Image (cartoon, coloured by chain):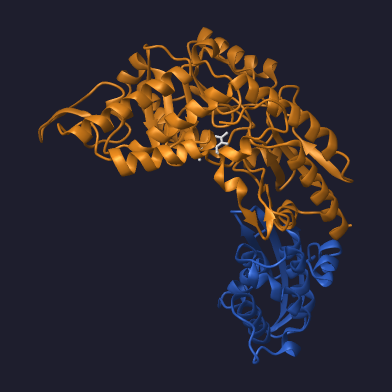
Chain colours: A orange, B blue
């Protein structure tokens, strides 16, 4: 495996897709906040599973079923340790962050919420950390409260403290904004929430592959992340939370694999994690995720963070050389997410023209419409960095943006 | 896929930079909302009818160059047309966006709209070009098209 030593690294070689040409030019992939590319070791793990180990888990006595079960449960342990959780936590495999939050909302709703209780989220949440809570409020009579942000894109912490009160039952906050890159002060948030007796949930979709995560150090009750944004496969993610609390929450989906006994009169459920994993899980996905976590750990989360910080600083500096470019999201603590607008050019037209040079960025509302409303923009263009990006990638981006400027003077 | 620079024909860039008939009408008969929730483009179309004839057509809102220029050209081309003339042009435009160029596609009829013929090669952008046209079509083809706006 290549090493991440400086910001012109050669990790690209670990990712077969990065050798592809798009419209005849080499792919420059800057859409990592949407999904990351997969290293060969992750692809190999999936191929190995399907070609040598494929079987269903839990219920089989035959050899392959035992191998698959062992690997699936080993994957669970690997994720738990990657997130810094001890055995008071349970790691539940979900299809991704979206399902993880829905699962938590469903279980916490019936367990905790009464009319007039409050759920706190922020102005910068992704739709998947808004809508499950909104629907839960409709169902229970609880109320959604929004922590406001500054123009720079930082949470107004004094407002958070003002909003937090004895009726606050759940505080659900993103670790890192997928639009702004803001790294939120989640330790402080979780600790203040705990003081009020509220349950905290941290959306780690945009942090887990970019920052060191330790759920105990953070002090979060729940932490959720998606493998596909962590160089792992699509279709698998994680909800990590206190086993004791999860055991009191009602199941999200029901079916096989999660029951003790079933009669037509009554079903009794297993304890976590099985209780929340009805049906055949994404076994290959869990195994692919393990390979991705090994890849991240081998590369080193500290090295990844400092690599991406260097690129972010460089990118922030050179992007502003483009006339009429405005960066949205100027928090002091950011990850490698660069959202911007370009005067007189719609973000879709920027993305379309960059595609011509093989540069993949994203344009639109990034599933964060309330945040777009806050900034009074219909959409932004967003370049988001990953471990394989280099200074040259940023230079190519800036050159292409100068060309966009020429097309749309 | 072909070079996306070809998408941005001069006339499209011009209508994008300086959209025609941009802004509300003082007393429209109909206001139509045209939006694409996937990308966030949103336009309002203001329509004033004199019997069957489109007396005035304005629009405002926000979207990419393709959707904005297309809306702008639409307002210039359909003013003064009868409902059925408008619908015919609408149909030809949609056909041009969605199919291979054919001999029968009369350039004269499409006029400046030919600038959008490259859009066909970018399937993601067809809905941008067609956005306001389809919204207008939906009211022109409905019988209650003379209801007053609820503002
Ligand atoms: C901050 C944030 N939360 C949640 C999600 C949803 O993740 P998934 O689509 O993997 O469920 C995303 C993905 O875009 C995200 O960026």
- The structure residue drawn at horizontal position 32% and vertical position 28%, both measured from the top left corner, is A71
- The structure residue drawn at horizontal position 78% and vertical position 69%, both measured from the top left corner, is B72
Quarter of the image for the C terminus of chain B: give it: bottom right
Q: Is residue B109 visible?
A: yes
Residue A265 falls in which quadrant of the image? top left
Viewed as shown, does residue A333 lie left or right of A283?
right
Viewed as shown, does residue A185 lie left or right of B4?
left
Q: Is residue B145 visible?
A: no
- Percent x, y for residue B80? 77, 83
Quarter of the image for the N terminus of chain B: give it: bottom right
- Percent x, y for residue A116? 48, 23
Residue B116 falls in which quadrant of the image? bottom right
Viewed as shown, does residue B68 lie left or right of A38?
right
- The structure residue drawn at horizontal position 76% and vertical position 89%, both measured from the top left corner, is B108
Q: Residue furthest top?
A: A195
| Nearer to me, B89 or A202 | A202
- Percent x, y for residue A81? 44, 17
B100 up-or-down from A90: above or below: below
Viewed as shown, does residue A94 lie left or right of B63?
left
| Nearer to me, B55 or A133 | A133
Q: Residue furthest bottom?
A: B104
- Percent x, y for residue A154? 71, 24
């Amino acid at each position: 495996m290549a090493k991440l030593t400086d910001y012109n690294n050669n990790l690209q070689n670990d990712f077969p897709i990065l050798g592809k040409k798009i419209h005849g030019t080499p792919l420059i992939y800057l859409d990592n906040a949407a999904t990351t590319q997969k290293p060969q070791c992750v692809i190999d793990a999936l191929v190995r599973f399907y070609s040598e180990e494929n079987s269903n888990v839990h219920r089989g006595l035959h050899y392959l079923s035992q191998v698959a079960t062992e690997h699936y449960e080993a994957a669970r342990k690997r994720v738990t340790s990657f997130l810094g959780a001890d055995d008071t936590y349970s790691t539940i495999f979900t299809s991704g962050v979206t399902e993880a939050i829905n699962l938590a909302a469903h279980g916490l709703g019936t367990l905790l919420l009464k009319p007039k209780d409050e759920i706190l989220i922020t102005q910068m949440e992704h739709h998947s950390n808004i809508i499950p809570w909104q629907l839960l409020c409709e169902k229970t009579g609880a109320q959604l409260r929004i922590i406001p942000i500054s123009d720079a894109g930082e949470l107004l912490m004094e407002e958070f403290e003002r909003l937090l009160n004895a009726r606050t039952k759940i505080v659900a906050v993103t670790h890192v904004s997928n639009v702004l890159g803001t790294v939120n002060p989640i330790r402080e948030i979780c600790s203040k929430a705990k003081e009020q007796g509220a349950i905290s949930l941290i959306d780690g979709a945009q942090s887990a592959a970019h920052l060191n995560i330790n759920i105990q150090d953070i002090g979060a009750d729940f932490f959720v992340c998606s493998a596909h944004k962590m160089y792992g496969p699509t279709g698998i993610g994680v909800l990590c939370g206190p086993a004791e609390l999860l055991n009191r929450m009602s199941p999200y989906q029901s079916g096989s694999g999660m029951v003790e006994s079933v009669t037509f009169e009554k079903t009794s459920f297993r304890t976590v994690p099985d209780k929340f994993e009805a049906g055949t899980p994404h076994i290959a996905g869990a195994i692919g995720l393990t390979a991705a976590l090994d890849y991240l750990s081998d590369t080193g989360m500290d090295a990844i963070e400092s690599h991406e910080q260097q690129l972010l600083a460089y990118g922030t500096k050179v992007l502003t050389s483009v006339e009429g470019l405005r960066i949205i999201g100027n928090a002091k603590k950011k990850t490698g997410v660069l959202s911007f607008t370009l005067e007189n050019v719609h973000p879709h037209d920027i993305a379309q023209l960059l595609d011509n040079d093989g540069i993949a960025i994203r344009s639109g509302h990034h599933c964060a419409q309330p945040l777009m409303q806050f900034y009074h923009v219909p959409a932004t263009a967003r370049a988001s960095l990953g471990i394989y990006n280099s200074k040259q990638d940023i230079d190519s981006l800036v050159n292409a943006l100068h060309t966009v400027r020429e097309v749309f003077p | 896929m072909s070079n996306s620079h070809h998408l941005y024909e001069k006339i499209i860039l011009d209508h994008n930079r300086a959209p025609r008939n941009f802004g509300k009408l003082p007393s429209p008969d109909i206001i139509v909302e045209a939006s694409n929730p996937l990308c966030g483009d949103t336009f309002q179309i203001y329509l004033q009818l004199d019997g069957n004839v489109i007396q005035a057509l304005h629009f405002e809102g926000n979207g990419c160059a393709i959707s904005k220029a297309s809306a702008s050209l639409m307002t210039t081309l359909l003013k003064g047309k009868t409902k059925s003339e408008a619908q015919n042009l609408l149909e030809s435009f949609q056909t041009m966006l969605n199919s291979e160029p054919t001999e029968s596609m009369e350039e004269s009829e499409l006029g400046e709209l030919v600038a959008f013929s490259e859009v066909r090669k970018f399937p993601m952008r067809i809905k941008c070009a067609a956005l306001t046209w389809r919204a207008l079509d939906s009211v022109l083809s409905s019988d209650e098209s003379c209801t007053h706006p609820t503002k």
